[in-house]
Amino acid sequence: MKNLKNVLIGFTLLIVIWQLIIIVGNYEEALLPSPLKVGEAVLSIILNGTFFVHLQVSFMRFFIGYLSSVVIAVILGLILGRLARLWAIIDPIVQVIRPVSPIAWSPFIVLWFGIGDIPAIVIIFIASFFPVLLSTVSAVRKIDKTYLRVAQNFEIKQPQLMWKIIFPASFSYIANGLHIALGAAWIFLVAGEMVGAQSGLGFLIVDARNSLRLDIVIAGIIFIGICGLILDKGIKLFERWVEKHWGGLESSAN
Amino acid sequence: MTNQSPIISVNKITKTFFNRGQPQKILDQISFDVQRGELISILGKSGCGKSTLLNLIGGFDLEKEGEILLDGQVVNQPSRRCVMLMQNYGLLPWRSVLKNVELPLENTGMSKKEIRERAKYYLHMVGLGDKLDAFPKELSGGMQQRVAIARAFVIQPEVILMDEPFAALDAFTRYYLQDELIKIQEKENTTILLVTHDIDEAIYLSNRIFMLSANPGRIYQELKIPSSRPRDRSSLQFQKYREIIFRNFHFNHPIAPIELNV
């Protein structure tokens, strides 16, 4: 309740300052739309359904990109985490590629995958890939040796060793990587949809800019922010569930 | 092989660690045999190489001089026939109690139903029949150790190695679990090799006690305790064994004051 009050105070302040800037600076609507105008835009794109069309497309791309990335990165991470020699060779390459914004690949992505859903999916894939890969590898390398000894003792061999011992033992760290990747992927969703897509929340913004509807641009920004927040809350719930069932990060301690 | 042959045979084991390039002998020419169904304690103060010895016997550590045989075969890897009970219990926190005990049975070709029944049987045996669905962190240390004991016995290994199994428990829980251990061991006729620094524990549980000196670790005394178990911790005979052990440690460490803890 108190939390809600703070949220209300914060946003009221934001809107007041926003309106004040417009009044004091005497800016035109075409330069900085007023809160009221944006409110109207928000309502209109909800009511005429465009928002939901774009949201649906964006979510579809987001989950395909994110989930395929997570599955591949976790599997690769589990394997590479066990192969110290190979990881020592691959790690420097990863360290060089990782800081490159996925957008930098966009010329190639458009060249190879054309336009449509795929470029956005690929960009989301790249954005979530490295956080998950790196956290999985380090989780596997940090795994409590006791679990490996227990597995050795009971003669648990691959592939059972992987999915009965190593994966669950490193899961709470991996979940951490999933969280970071989710945020990164959502940020790059918009960028991805500005590259050769004809729909989605990112496209909504580009399209509104092209027709000089800055009120809709801001409405789009608001929606992207709220959806990102909801996703973040969702994965936090997931993490809490993981912690409950897999034990917290310190579970390996005595 | 007849049943008369020793289940474990340790032949002239020497273990050297390198500390900043300096060789340091942790274990020196350790030899002993363990007969089937025996409970042996290796008694020594911390740092004398007790755990190292147990790791070597379990096949977790293979770098050594000398030879270790399990039922006549050279130990060159850990095996299900010789289960190690870890100091921190080694339970998998993401599995329920029942699932933890089922773990070692899962790749044995037994049916799901058989596995479940067997796991339940051993959990009932350690008095945890009502905790099947609990998770390890919801249990006390003593209960966790009982789960670990059930998990060790469930595959009916020939040998169980225990690394200070009750050290982290309070005295009452410890006494209780020691009794439980004796009961299960007699029922299952498992050979147990136990490492401890608790003198009373060694006397209470063991058929034989090996006393290990430190730097380098050597067995300098073997003490046979022929009386039948359970034993009376306050009996005169019990005190006699304590005295022998105290005297022995005193010989080795003449300056150290003797601490009697009951």
Image (cartoon, rainbow, N blue to C red):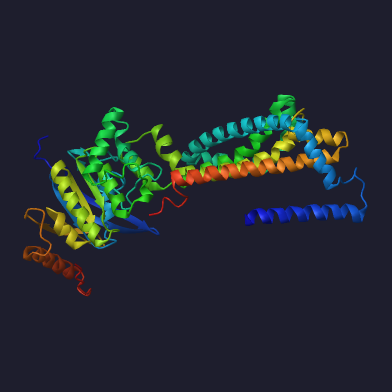
Side of B22 relative to A233 (left or right) = left
Identity of the residue drawn at 32% across and 40% down: B98
In-front residue for pair A21/A235 = A21
Q: How many marks?
A: 0
The picture places residue B23, in percent across and down from the top left corner, at 33, 58
- Quadrant assignment for the N terminus of chain A: bottom right
Q: Farthest front residue?
A: A1
**In which quadrant of the rendered view does residue A14 lie?**
bottom right
Identity of the residue drawn at 41% across and 43% down: B94
The picture places residue A27, in percent across and down from the top left corner, at 92, 49
**In which quadrant of the rendered view does residue B251 lie?**
bottom left
Side of A49 relative to A159 (left or right) = right
Q: Is residue A65 above or below residue A175?
A: above
Identity of the residue drawn at 16% across and 50% down: B182
- Quadrant assignment for the C terminus of chain A: bottom left
Q: Is residue B55 above or below residue A212?
A: below
Side of A30 relative to B46 (left or right) = right
The answer to whether any part of residue A92 appears in the image is no
The picture places residue A105, in percent across and down from the top left corner, at 72, 34
The answer to whether any part of residue A12 appears in the image is yes
Q: Is residue A139 above or below residue B215?
A: above
The picture places residue A127, in percent across and down from the top left corner, at 65, 38
Identity of the residue drawn at 72% across and 40% down: A224
Q: Is residue B156 above or below residue B245?
A: above
